[in-house]
Structures are given as C-alpha cells and as structure tokens.
Image: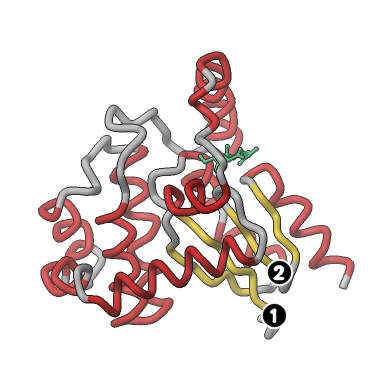
Amino acid sequence: MSDRVIEFFFDVGSPYTYLAATQVTAIEARTGVRVRHRPFLLGGVFKATGNTPPAQVASRGRWMVQDLGRWAAKYGVPFAIASRFPLNTLATQRVLAAAERTGGEAAVRALALPLFRAFWVEDRDVSSPAVLVEVANACGLDGTMLVESANAPETKELLRASTEEAVARGAFGAPSFFVGDQLFFGNDRIGHLEDLLASH
Ligand SMILES: N[C@@H](CCC(=O)N[C@@H](CS)C(=O)NCC(=O)O)C(=O)O
C-alpha cells in the first residue's frame, strides 16, 4: 500500500454514499491507496453551504430511484430505497464519530458498511439506539459503550469538526472523497479519482 490516502467523508443517510461505500475494498485493491473513513453530517454540510438534498426536486427524486437502481445492479449489490429516507442521521453519525474517537479508523471501517446495509438493504431505523447497539455488537464492537459515547462532548465536537473541515475544503454533498486538496464528489466520480491516482 502506498503512503497516500483517500479520505472518504460519508453519511449513512445518503444512498449514493452507500453505493460508494460498497466499492471501498475494490478501490483500494485497484489503486494500492488506503481509504480513510471519515464520518460527517450531511445535514450540516447542506446547512453550511446553502445546498439542498437533490430529491427535493420531485422529478429528480423519481429519476434518482432509477439511477440508484442501475448503479446497484452494475455493482451487483442489494439496494432498496429506505422507507425512512430522508432520515435525520445525527445519532447515527455520532455513533460513528464515537467509534472513530474510541477505536480509530479501524472501528469506523468495521461499522460503516454494516450500518449502510442496515439502512439501504434491510430498511432498519439506524437512528434508533437499539438498532445502533445491535449493529455495532454484531461488528464485534461495544455497542452500548458507543451509543453512550455518542453523546459525549468530545464526540459531538469530533463530528462537528469533521463536517466543518470537509466544508472548508470544498465539500457540498456526499459522498465526498479527497486526495490531498482535490475533491471528488459522487459515487460516479470514483473513476476520476482513480485516474488521478494512476497519473501521479
Ligand atoms: N452524481 C452523484 C450524486 C450524489 C448525490 O446526489 N448526493 C447527494 C446526497 S445522496 C448530495 O449530497 N447531493 C448534493 C448535490 O447534488 O449538490 C453520484 O453519482 O454519486
């Protein structure tokens, strides 16, 4: 593995970010560059930038359902529009920030895709403490401790700081990948990211 890094700012409530999250291992295998999972709060990004969720335009929302289905089929991954979408993911993202604070990137990585799957495949309420505890425990983490730590001031501050950092670096939505100061927005820009890594 190279000593370079791909930073992956993600929020479990974003369907395009779920698609991107299913590709992390393949991206690392193709590029030889490690992906660092960085939970942030997409709602905070929208608020800070004045951006809005794309599905607020009804016709775009209907098209997105088709587009997301096509990407899922292309990747060969299960996907269904979550019945609770759009979800307030503050509790979810704070649990991920708690995992980052207490267990480092390895803990975030262990928890991220199972939480995405719980929401975008199993249609579970990933903002519920009971579901968060169960999913984290199933990953071999201490779910009760993470849900408790989610409300610690240090955890709230970590999530706020990561969100502010992403916005300061130019993020306006999710998924947001960074290679150094270069932003790649969207699951559909993973190819551009890999082109950059191949050219340097
Ligand atoms: N074309 C992008 C779309 C990604 C997207 O729409 N992400 C939403 C959250 S699910 C977002 O943050 N949108 C902000 C925007 O489109 O400005 C992709 O294929 O991933």
- Residue depicted at 29% across the width and 45% down the height: 118
Give the amino acid at mark 2: Val
Query: Is 64 above or below relative to 100?
Result: above
- Residue depicted at 71% across the width and 59% down the height: 183
Quarter holding the N terminus is bottom right
Q: Secondary structure at mark 2?
A: strand
Q: Secondary structure at mark 1?
A: loop
In-front residue for pair 157/140: 157
Residue tagged by mark 2?
179
Residue tagged by mark 1?
4
For residue 90, side relative to residue 44 (left or right): left
> Label 2 near label 1: C-beta < 8 Å?
yes
Q: Residues within 10 Å of mark 2 (few under 14, many from 20)?
A: some
Q: Provide residue 20's location: percent of width, then percent of height.
A: 55, 49
Quarter holding the C terminus is bottom right
- Residue depicted at 14% across the width and 55% down the height: 129
For residue 145, side relative to residue 82 (left or right): left
